[in-house]
């Protein structure tokens, strides 16, 4: 009995050939699964790296510094936009009546590659006077007209808000899609701490670009951008005296964006920020 039991125990300790084959298959299957998982992980990591590289490339910008002339000559002022373009700003006429003002000016934007666009910009501004019971309200209107017509700077202005609307047609080519309508509205309120906020659109009927601009106290340095479907195409950031254009833009779109940005930086008095 003892010998028989010992043989039975030894026999249980030695796996049969079929068991060895089964275990070998299990081990092989596990190794294949591990190798497959590692391969998928490597592919996923490589794909993520490629996507990150593509994203960084698509977010690349080219910068052109802005150089403004300090003086106007015969109502004109020229600016150089890096090695890309020259802009001529021609100050137009101003018409003031009570607390409304109409102002016109023209821009000529010429790239050094030969492309150019010339346009007229119209600005309509409505000023909000103080309450009607403000002392000397009638005199305030007179003072306002005097300042606007003769430029007397020591006249106290008594408006505390205004809305200024800019409109223009920008044509960069001969096809219908090359004609764009520019519209931007700027609002100012004294209670907002002298912040200047502007927003608008640039559209050719099939595409619409969105415009945002601001000038915040105490520096009042302009911060502006033009974007489409959430993607920034052109911008001017605080602390950078230049324009950033999305890399790879077509020449006509780039010229369009520069023209729109130049309209934005001209304030209600016809001067650059």
Image (tube, grey):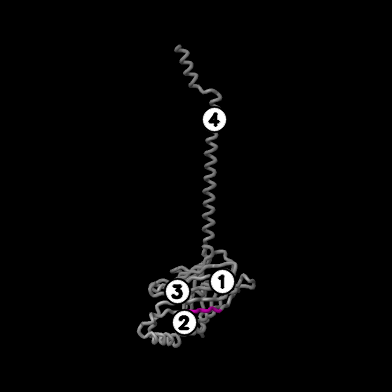
How far apart are labels 1 and 3 at the CA level?
Answer: 24 Å
Q: Secondary structure at mark 4?
A: helix
Disc 4 vs disc 3: Cβ atoms closer than 8 Å?
no
* Residue denoted by label 3: 187
Q: Earlier in the sequence, mark 4 or mark 1?
A: 4
The tag on residue 256 is 1
Q: Nearer the viewer, residue 213 or 52?
A: 213
The tag on residue 24 is 4
Label 3 CA crowd tier, 10 Å (few <14, some 14–19, many 20+):
some
Check the image and name the residue furthest to the front.
133
Q: Is residue 62 magenta?
A: no
Q: With respect to residue 100, does 113 lie above or below? A: above
The picture places residue 72, in percent across and down from the top left corner, at 49, 82
Q: Earlier in the sequence, mark 3 or mark 2?
A: 2
Check the image and name the residue furthest to the left.
135
How far apart are labels 3 and 2 at the CA level?
Answer: 14 Å
* Residue denoted by label 2: 100
The picture places residue 267, in percent across and down from the top left corner, at 47, 77
Disc 4 vs disc 1: Cβ atoms closer than 8 Å?
no
């Amino acid at each position: 009995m003892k010998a028989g039991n010992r043989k039975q125990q030894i026999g249980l300790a030695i796996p049969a050939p079929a068991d060895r084959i089964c275990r070998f298959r299990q081990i092989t299957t596990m190794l294949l699964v591990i190798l497959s998982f590692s391969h998928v992980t490597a592919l996923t990591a490589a794909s993520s790296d490629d996507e990150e590289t593509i994203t960084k490339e698509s977010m690349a910008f080219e910068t052109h510094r802005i150089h403004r002339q300090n003086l106007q000559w015969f109502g004109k002022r020229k600016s150089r936009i890096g090695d890309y373009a020259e802009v001529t700003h021609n100050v137009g006429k101003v018409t003031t009546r009570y607390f409304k003002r109409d102002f016109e000016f023209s821009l000529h934007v010429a790239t050094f590659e030969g492309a150019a666009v010339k346009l007229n910009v119209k600005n309509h501004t409505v000023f909000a006077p103080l309450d009607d019971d403000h002392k000397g309200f009638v005199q305030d209107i007179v003072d306002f007209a005097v300042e606007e017509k003769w430029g007397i700077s020591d006249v106290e202005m008594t408006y505390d808000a205004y809305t200024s609307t800019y409109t223009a047609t920008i044509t960069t080519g001969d096809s219908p899609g090359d004609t764009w309508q520019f519209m931007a509205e700027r609002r100012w309120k004294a209670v907002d701490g002298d912040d200047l906020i502007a927003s608008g659109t640039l559209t050719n009927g099939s595409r619409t670009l969105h415009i945002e601009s601001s000038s915040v106290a105490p520096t009042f340095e302009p911060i502006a951008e033009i974007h489409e479907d959430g993607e920034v195409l052109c911008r001017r950031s605080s602390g950078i005296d230049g324009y950033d254009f999305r890399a790879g833009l077509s020449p006509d779109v780039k010229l369009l964006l520069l023209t729109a940005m130049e309209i934005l930086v001209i304030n209600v008095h016809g001067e650059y920020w």
